[in-house]
Amino acid sequence: GRSPFWKRTCAEALAYGRLGQQPNERHRAEALRLCREIRAEDPDYSCNLSLLGQLYLQGWGTQKDPAQAVSLFERAHELDWKGYPSCHCQDGLLAACLEKGEGTERDSGRAKKLILDAVARSGAYVHDNVASMYVFYFLRGEDGFEAGTVRAMAERNLAEHAFNPSLWTILLRAAGRAGLDEKKLRRQLKQSEIMGEKVLNDYVAAHGSDPEFFPHMGN
């Protein structure tokens, strides 16, 4: 059978439309099925718990359930602190819920601590969800959210994750205040879109015809 990692990659592609087409409810229902299947196989796979939580948070493939989403983000956060491999995306997702009071009591203080801790542990190599919340607090002038760290995010991710358009869009919001070169960021954004499209084309070429995991391709 396919590995949990591969299934999660498929589920994320289905949920977010990373297949060269717009997602629909059939895609997202399939994403939910895959995430639940992965959880049965590996209940401690924190990245899968984060994606499953996002499906509940948005109501994709299921009824919207922010409280269930937060519970899954909390579990993923707990596993990460135990050393389970993670990209810290759950910390950004959990922080956003805490900041807004969505699915849980509002706790801006804990939200900010989650983001600062995630950035410190990752050495500024962060997931979109963490970067988004860091930039949000930075632009709001919150203590501890520094321009130098925003610049470090750009430098570190340029070296290691250059094909992520979402990240460059987020960093562009802070370009002026953080002292980033906006023209360079826009060039990187355009390049990342081209690189990302190539990655997707290669991925779909390799796996898109698999009827077990991409049953709705072309629908």
Image (cartoon, helix red, strand yellow):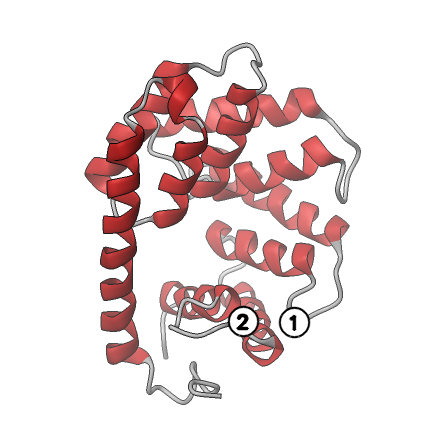
Residue 121 can be seen, yes or no: yes
In this picture, residue 177 sits left or right of residue 68: left
Q: Position of residue 60 (x, y in %)?
A: 64, 66
Q: Is residue 142 above or below residue 81?
A: above
Q: Residues within 10 Å of mark 1 (few under 14, many from 20)?
A: some
Q: Nearer the viewer, residue 45 or 183?
A: 183
The residue positioned 75% from the left and 66% from the top of the image is 63
Question: Are the two marked residues, 2 and 1, in contact with CB atoms closer than 8 angstroms?
Answer: yes
Q: Position of residue 46 (x, y in %)?
A: 50, 50
The residue positioned 58% from the left and 68% from the top of the image is 36
Question: Label 1 sits on what residue type?
Answer: Gly
In the picture, the disc for residue 61 is 1
Q: Is residue 16 above or below residue 80?
A: below
Q: Is residue 145 above or below residue 185?
A: above
Q: Nearer the viewer, residue 132 or 94?
A: 132
Q: Residue pushed farthest front? A: 183
Q: Position of residue 179 (x, y in %)?
A: 33, 17
Badge 2 is on which residue?
31
